[in-house]
Image: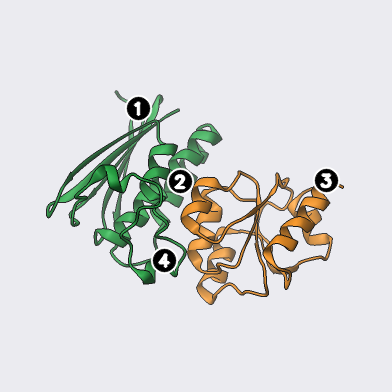
Chain colours: A orange, B green
Amino acid sequence: MTVQNLIDSGKFGTVNVGGDTARGITKPFCCDLLSIAMGRAPEGCAWVTVMGNMNTLAVASLADAACVIMAEGTQLDETAVKKAKEQEITVLKTEMPIFEAALEIYRMLNA
Amino acid sequence: MDDVITLNYEVSPDDFTRAGEASSDVKSKLKQMGVNPEAVRKVAIAMYEGEINMVIHAEGGRITVEISPSEIKMVLADKGPGIPDVDLAMQAGYSTAPDDIRSLGFGAGMGLPNMKKYSDDMVIDTTVGVGTTITMRVTI
């Protein structure tokens, strides 16, 4: 499943559509501590988090996540939205809790 | 060696909006040079952790990156407080980061362990009250 497929599924709201939406998603990844995410986020993951500051975007970019998903109705702050646009990172959003959002992606990946 | 490329960065103190800029820049340059993606990812992660540490603990500092055909060498030098107990600082989960840093999602005590994990070689040279220089190498 590509990032574009995930966007097109309509299951998540769109905050920013990034540059490489043809990129395949490897697996969902859940973490809110950036220090842990930095070391553990798998390459190409769909990273589900409630941490919406601009360091989230820096970690997503440096750790090579395919996209970021803001769960529990959390928002990216204004600086972070700007950073997402600049760095062309796809950011989606949902009211679902983190686990359910990740489970949904897992099911779509394994459908 | 002739074909060593050197990059220099200043890390600003207490500026979390800019933390990561140096690492991002190195990452994109390495990608352009066609360095293998796994090495690029290792450099990006190790250097970002170091950059964040300099912002949190050391009032910024200077990063020098040397790219040669065989390896990427990163030297992160600061004039911060130094690390009194390096073995303790290397333990996953140990952190002296203040609460405001933790609220940003950092301070989990994973910085130095991540740097060691993602570099092929790491040397810490630190003196309390003088500063810390960390040298990391990633083999290409």
Q: Chain of mark 1?
A: B
Place residue B66 in its image quadrant: top left
Check disc 1 and report the residue beneath it.
B3
Q: Could you say where residue A41 lies in the image, as x and y percent from the top left?
A: 57, 48
Mark 4 vs 2, N-terminal side: 2
Front tag of 3 and 2: 3
A45 lies above or below A100:
above
Check disc 2 and report the residue beneath it.
B45
Going 63% across and 74% down the picture, which residue do you hit? Answer: A74
Going 81% across and 65% down the picture, which residue do you hit? Answer: A11
Q: Chain of mark 3?
A: A
Along the horizontal axis of the image, is A78 left or right of B74? right
Along the horizontal axis of the image, is B116 left or right of A22? left
In what element is the residue under mark 1?
A: loop
Binning the other alpha carbons within 10 Å of mark 4 as few (below 14), some (14 to 19) or many (20 upward) gives: some
Q: What's the CA distance linking mark 1 and mark 4?
A: 41 Å
Check disc 4 and report the residue beneath it.
B102
Q: Could you say where residue B53 lies in the image, as x and y percent from the top left?
A: 33, 55
Q: Which label is found at residue A110? A: 3
Q: Amino acid at mark 3?
A: Asn
Q: Chain of mark 2?
A: B
Place residue B58 in its image quadrant: bottom left
Callouts 3 and 1 in the same chain:
no
